[in-house]
Amino acid sequence: MRIKTTREKRILYFKTTLRWIIYYLIIFSSFIVMTSGSWKKPVLLVPVALCIAINNDIMASAYTGAFCGLLIDVACGRLVGYNAVLLTVFCVASTLIFELYLRRKFVNFIVIAAAAAFLQCWLDYKFFYEIWGFADVERIFRNTTLKVWGYTVISSVFIYILFKIINNWLMPKEHLTIEEVIRTNQGA
Amino acid sequence: MGEFLKSTRFKVLLAFLAFLVGIMIYSVTKGGYSLSGVSFINTITKPFRYISNSISMKIEKNADSINNADAYYEENQELKKQIGELNKKLTNYDDLVAEVEELRKLVVIKEEHPDNIFSQPAEVMGYIANDPFKGFTIDRGYADDIEPYSPVITPEGIVGIVIDVSQHSSTVRTLLSPDLSIAAICSSTNTDFGIIEGTVITAENGMTKLTHLDKNHQIKKGDLMITSGSSGLFPKDHAIGTVTKTGIEANGLSAYAEIEPCADISRLRSVFVITDFDGKNDSTKEDTDEDKNNS
């Protein structure tokens, strides 16, 4: 890698700051969407947290997961910290999976997001409805849990595209392109 | 000069002037109607005048804008300010109207239930995401004397109970939830009573269920169920809902009725919290006393 100039460092710093501001604006908007209206809505914060996690280091993804989880707890009226724990685990696991085994491809993300969203929805159903033994509780799973999961998977597609655009624009490149290598060699 | 005055050109000029004066006098006698020649000229020149007029107007407008830009800017700012003030007044007026309307409703409930102490009107901040029982959050908390398990009502009837209180917000569990049980009595028969408790199936249609009803009940469709006040959680004689259907439970031991809540729980905008009432926590106190005696 070539050594970055002071100007490049400043640009990198500016872009990183701007990227995180945009990330948190998206998180905030997702929370607002989740708390508005009385109809069934996707748990937007799950794919948002995962999108951030797969493109950042473990600590950043863990903090983001925790923050998004807390917001889900508030939006869904759950025990504060429950979803925070869940999403922190999901985000760290996703970061590791994408670092070690998977490439950052659309299909891989959708599979991981669908699995994480299903786990979140299923555990929510288990702990907040089924465990209390309400009559006909399986109807909640069919009519609410599965629908919410489906909406979340569909929303993941749009969230992935949104983050792809942001990252293409503001994410520092990990590797030099061939053109950059040639240019760097010619410069040397 | 003398030569010019004597010349033919001067005489022609005088004649022309006289002709024009003649035309002028003639046109005065026409009483407001233009001469035929003038009309002809107007007709011929009409399209050109339109074009030229529009061009000149635009130029004038631009020139005027440039010349008086400062004056217009100031006038514009002044007008914007005035619009802002008027909008603010209008918003305040709308808020006042809404508040008066809310307070009017509160007065009606207060007259019906003089022992009840109500909170200020509480706005519904939002429904709990994906909750099948339509739980919601309100913008009043313990700073407004709201305590856990305070009943929540609208002018139409009981809505639910506060389950979680923070300083400036509270979470409400609705009567669609199986976790909330309300002792109810039929207002028309005054003898048929039971427990109103939500179920998963009835909640899907925004309804709740009256259980533990005697098989020989007199309840019929359309009857109003009200709070009996025996539990100490809810004050007496508040409307809960109307009966839409009755039947016998699967075990055959008791009857049930489906209840449509008086308030539309999925479309709530504002509610009231009853912070105190006669008989509050009586049942709970009795239970506690019994526990103490037993121990």
Image (spheres, coloured by chain):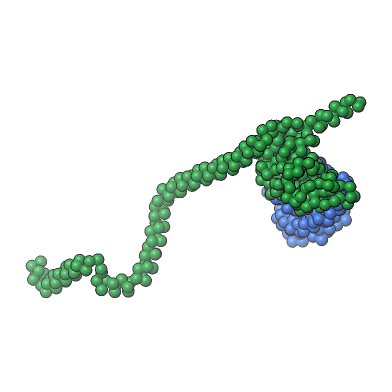
B260 or A147: nearer the viewer = B260
* Residue A141 pos. (x, y %): 84, 53
Q: Quadrant of residue B276?
A: top right
- Quadrant for the N terminus of chain B, please: bottom left
Q: Colour of chain A?
A: blue
**Residue B91 sits in which quadrant?**
top right
Closer to us: B106 or A152: B106
Direction from residue B55 to residue B93 in the image, left or right: right
**Residue drawn at point x = 85 percent, y = 27 percent:** B289
Q: Position of residue A124 (x, y in %)?
A: 84, 48
- B161 sits to left or right of B55: right
Q: Quadrant of the C terminus of chain B?
A: top right
Query: Is A145 situated left or right of B240 in this image?
Result: right
Q: Is residue B132 visible?
A: no
Q: Position of residue B259 (x, y in %)?
A: 76, 49
Between A132 and A97, which is closer to the camera in this rendering? A132
Residue drawn at x 38%, y 59% is B60
Note whether residue A157 is visible.
Answer: yes
